[in-house]
Image (cartoon, rainbow, N blue to C red):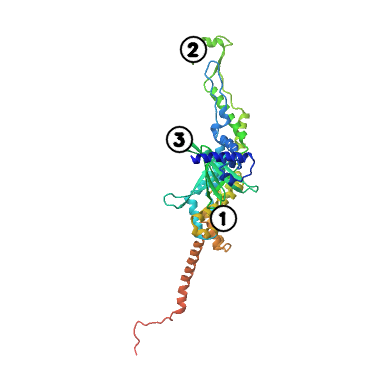
Amino acid sequence: MNNYLQQILTYFRNLTLNASGVSRDLYQLLQDKDISRALDMLQNRDDEVDQAIKEYNPQTHDVMKRPNKFRKGDDPYITEKLPRTRARYINDIELFFLLGNPIEWKKEEGDDEAFSLFTDFLEEQHFNSRIRQAKRLAGAETESALIAHIYRDDDTGERRVKLNVLARSKGYRLRPLFDTIGNMTAFAYGYVTKEHGRSIQHWDFQTPKILAYCRKAQIGWEVEIYPNPTGKINVIYFQQPKAWDGAEARINREEMLDSKTGDTNNYFSDPIAAATADVIQTMTDPNKPGKLIQLTGEKSRFEYVNPPQASQTRDAEKSDLSKSILFDTYTPDFDTEAMRGFGTLSGVAIRNAFILGYIKRDNRKEIYDELVGRFRNIVIAILAYEHPDKRAALEALKIKFEFAEPFADDKQAKWQSIASLYQAGLISLETAVTMLSLTDAPEEEIARLLAASAQKQQQGQQPSANKEDNPAQPPVNIPREPISA
């Protein structure tokens, strides 16, 4: 009862503060449990997201709203509605060029054991699949998020982390807050849970200092606020243009053209005949095909109506639409004809053939390079929280990353090239090991190689040293028979 009265008092207190124009920051609003006003401070892109989802889902395209044709005395004709999944294809090709292969991580400075903690975390959390999912959703909906949930295991009490992807199509509403120079200062996400047959609305907030969990009550909100153990917003917010941005009108036109062509094909799918009245009267049943048609005079006529042939103009428009949709969205054409013969091409030749995809890849790297770098920093902060004894080593890590090439390189040729450079003295052993990227502990690998090389040299010098210490005696001719006196 006391809790219920407190909710009522808080509700009316917030109404009074809002009406009087009192300025409160986000933390004060959360403390006051004024969640509606707190959400008003954050960025809301629901309209853009809803429009993108509508265009991404073929069942909600404009072509699906084509009206049927009503026929007098007959059932209405159901018009063809033929949407295409152009948006999905374009988005998946964009994803393939950016994240078709896993991101490559390389340690520049720091402890190998700390770097192993970093790579193990990525593997345990299925980072490669999580970021691919987040990227696909961002390309389809214009926004998504990758969040690290930090919690304690109820059974063991150990610190745990769970990566999760948030997006509108997964039931989440995203609300970031940026300052004037583009730094994210807060993030909130809303979702609905079912409790005892009732839908309960939730909003969770994160700032570098606090984690706030808000649950809608019958009156007002229930709010729990905790300190943020990492000191960072444990969320990567992805925002980008639609993958098919700029091609919406042409995609819609292509679907309408295909649907109208389908209607024409349906209309002429059964044979249609044109005949004069006297011929029709001689037919026993005009609705059934006859073997003999009787013509009663010179003007009598009976002939089948040929379906209209595809016009050159329509074929040209359809071909132009198909090409322009891909070209305008920087999407290479991966049809069977285009892929023939690519198996024998070198990596440079393939890159030149798919230059449109690489142009778009570089454009998207302008967005995702910074976000992946921020994720790296968040992971290090989380690991420092999970492993306090390794905090210094983790914070001293310097990790570089690269977006891998979408098409697999010829590894043998790459390794031979690096080996040739090393043997020619153009690169050091450290650089060669780093370029090969065959180990997660390059320092240990270099130490093993140097030790093996030193041991080999020592073994090679050992016989010569024994030869100098024990010079061979001059040959002596030993007679077979003793020499008589």
Is 404 or 123 nearer to us in this picture?
123
Q: CA distance from mark 3 to mark 1?
A: 49 Å
Q: Residue 389: image x %, image y %?
A: 49, 59
Q: Residue 470: image x %, image y %?
A: 44, 79
> Disc number at residue 319?
none
Mark 3 crowdedness (10 Å alpha carbons): few <14, some 14-19, many ≥20: few
Residue at coordinates 42% horizontally, 80% vertically from top-left? 475
Choose mark 3 or mark 1, whichever is in front. 3
> Disc number at residue 285?
2
Choose mark 1 or mark 2, whichever is in front. 1
N-term mark: 1 or 2? 2
Q: Is residue 250 above or below residue 264?
A: below
> Disc number at residue 400?
1
Q: Is residue 471 above or below residue 22?
A: below
N-term mark: 2 or 3? 3
* Quadrant, the C terminus: bottom left
N-term mark: 3 or 1? 3
For label 3, the residue is 197
**Tag 3 secondary structure:** loop
Is 286 or 22 nearer to us in this picture?
22
**Tag 1 secondary structure:** strand
- Answer whether residue 250 is visible to the viewer in this image: yes
- Answer whether residue 220 is visible to the viewer in this image: no
Residue type at the position of mark 1: Lys
**Tag 2 secondary structure:** loop
Q: Are marks 1 and 2 in contact (CB under 8 Å)?
A: no
Residue at coordinates 47% horizontally, 75% vertically from top-left? 464
Q: Residue 126: image x %, image y %?
A: 48, 48
Residue at coordinates 47% horizontally, 35% vertically from top-left? 198
Residue type at the position of mark 3: Gly
